[in-house]
């Protein structure tokens, strides 16, 4: 189930779907996705599908993790990155291997605690996890070179735009739950914010408030 051949097959699929960044592909190939799942689901870890992690949340599909990471890195390396919605910590682990320091916020405490354990298990020392409502960003740690949201708001949160450094990029799904959502990219330039609509996606909603 975790064999090299199974992982290589996943990388082949991601390439077929248009993922080109070889650093991103290498990191996905070498990151054990099965440790981010409960044992009963671990045998499905290298399928290109989203999988349940409890609390009505999902571990994102590898394609979407690859696509969002590729967009985040498109204009060069990113030193300080904010992630909204740590979930299982899988996307966090991918970012931790490609960026300087990761600040990741999760509103559901048991998910954040599990993700923190996995970061320790994998030996990442450049990840800071926090139990909080990430819709407001993490103002004390900003501004960020990049922000990635794993949950979809109906409109882009102004707080996240405000916490982008000049040259920084926000990658975020936007749209109502269960209806058409699109992945968007927002770049902060000297002149202001530039918005690009990328492709249709399906994400869990960005919800305000926290769960202990
Ligand atoms: N990349 C994660 C995706 C998890 S799903 C993974 O692959 O495991 C999205 C996560 O966003 C969920 O865990 C959900 O609890 C969290 N979330 C939703 N709204 C949030 C908010 N306002 N602040 C922080 N986390 C939020």
Image (cartoon, grey):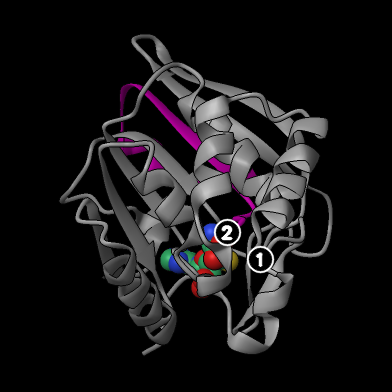
The mark found on residue 204 in the picture is 1
Residue depicted at 65% across the width and 77% down the height: 42
Query: Is the C-beta of the residue carrying label 1 under 8 Å from the nearest atom of ligand 1?
Result: yes
Total residue callouts? 2
Tag shown at residue 151: 2
Residue at 36% over, 23% down: 77
Ranked by sequence position, the earlier of labels 2 and 1 is 2
What is the C-alpha distance between the residues marked 2 and 1? 5 Å
Is label 2's Cβ within 8 Å of ligand 1? yes
Is residue 174 at least partly visible in the picture? no
Identify the secondary structure beneath mark 1. loop
Q: Nearer the viewer, residue 25 or 182?
A: 25
Q: Is residue 65 visible?
A: yes
Quadrant of the drawing holding the C terminus: bottom left
* For residue 115, side relative to residue 165 (left or right): right
Q: Is residue 35 left or right of residue 196?
A: left
Answer left or right for 136 relative to 148.
left
Where's residue 166, x and y in %?
Answer: 30, 20
Q: Which mark is residue 74?
A: none
Q: Taking 188 as reference, is 44 above or below it?
A: below
Task: Check if residue 161 falls in the magenta segment.
Answer: yes
| Residue 93: percent from left, percent from top | 41, 55
> Residue 203, located in which quarter of the rendered image?
bottom right
Which residue shows up at 84% across the image and 57% down it? 179
Q: Residues within 10 Å of mark 2 (few under 14, many from 20)?
A: many
Decide: marks 2, 1 in contact (CB < 8 A)? Answer: yes
Task: State which region is magenta.
Answer: 152-174
Q: Quadrant of residue 84?
A: bottom left
In this view, 178 is above or below 68: below
Residue at position x 65%, y 82% in the image:
56
Residue 37 location (% of width, % of height): 58, 77
């Amino acid at each position: 189930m975790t064999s090299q051949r199974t992982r290589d097959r996943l990388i082949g699929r991601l390439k077929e779907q248009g993922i080109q960044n070889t650093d991103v592909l290498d990191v996905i190939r070498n990151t054990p996705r099965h440790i981010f799942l409960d044992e009963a689901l671990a045998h499905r870890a290298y399928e290109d599908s989203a999988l349940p992690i409890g609390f009505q949340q999902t571990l994102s599909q590898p394609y979407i993790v690859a696509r969002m990471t590729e967009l985040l890195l498109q204009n060069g390396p990113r030193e300080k990155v904010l992630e909204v919605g740590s979930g299982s910590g899988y996307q966090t682990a991918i970012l931790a291997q490609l960026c300087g320091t990761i600040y990741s916020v999760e509103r559901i405490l048991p998910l954040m605690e599990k993700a923190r354990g996995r970061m320790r298990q994998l030996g990442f020392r450049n990840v800071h996890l926090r139990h909080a409502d990430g819709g407001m960003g993490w103002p004390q740690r900003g501004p960020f070179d990049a922000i990635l949201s794993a949950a979809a708001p109906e409109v882009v949160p102004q707080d996240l735009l405000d916490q982008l450094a000049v040259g920084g990029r926000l990658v975020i799904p936007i749209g109502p739950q269960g209806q058409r959502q699109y992945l968007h990219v927002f770049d902060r330039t000297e002149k202001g914010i530039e918005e690009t609509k990328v492709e249709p996606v399906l994400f869990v909603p960005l919800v305000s408030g926290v769960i202990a």
